[in-house]
Amino acid sequence: MKLTSIAPPNSSIFEGINKSNGTNSESTIGTEQARRRGMVLPFWPLSLAFNHVNYYVDMPAEMKKNGSGKDRLQLLRDVSGAFRPGVLTALVGVSGAGKTTLMDVLAGRKTGGYIEGTVSISGYPKNQATFARISGYCEQNDIHSPHITVYEFLLYSAWSRLASEVKHETRKVH
């Protein structure tokens, strides 16, 4: 999962940010620098941290019929971790360990079930509507064209997230 946010380039995560209202105290930071570097939409990397995440689904009828007295089946139990910006992180485990389930929960792809725990983006509580705009996630069963590069795919994904006011010429600049 790649997390980025539109913000001044080369700034630390909280530099120039007023935490009380989330506004940038220096709105022109990096504007000239971004123009010189050819960047139209500068960004800064974000971190994602999750603590004591539990995920439950309703107990399947077949399991209830076979004597399970519980109403919920726990698929994730007390999972904590972090994804740091600029660091490749491998999520490994045996088949059925919950790797895909964890990624789906963190990405907000699980619409059913019950999620407990905390997920934060660079120290702020995760807001799913905002998170969906700043992140990209390729599921393991996604089918990708062998005729485009990873860069082209990511560019397409980013373009689809830009506001409709962004001109076509601006979208092409990278």
Image: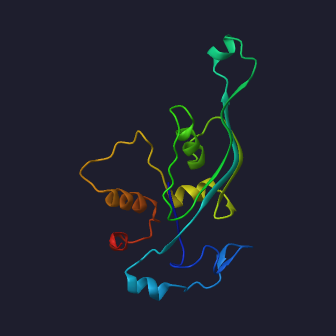
Q: Position of residue 81 (x, y in %)?
A: 63, 52
On screen, 144 above or below 29? Answer: above
Q: Quadrant of residue 130?
A: bottom right
Quarter that holds the C terminus:
bottom left
Residue 56 percent across, percent down from the top left? 68, 33
Q: In the image shown, does 47 or 34 lie closer to the viewer? A: 47
Q: Is residue 138 left or right of residue 28?
A: left
- Residue drawn 38% across and 72% down? 167
Direction from residue 117 to residue 82 in the image, left or right:
left
Residue lying farthest to the left in this orientation: 147
Number of labels in the image equals 0
Q: Nearer the viewer, residue 2 or 85?
A: 85
- Between 81 and 39, which is closer to the camera in this rendering? 81
Q: Residue furthest bottom?
A: 32
Whether 76 is drawn above or below 131: the answer is: above
Q: Is residue 68 left or right of residue 173?
A: right
Q: Tell me the quarter of the picture where residue 55 sits.
A: top right
Q: How is the image coloured?
A: rainbow
Rendered image quadrant of residue 112 = top right
In this rendering, is residue 98 above or below 85?
above
Residue at point 57%, 65% (across, down): 46
Residue 141 in picture, x, y percent from top left: 41, 39
x and y, in percent, of residue 34 in the image: 44, 82
Identify which residue is drawn at 26% across, 48% down: 146
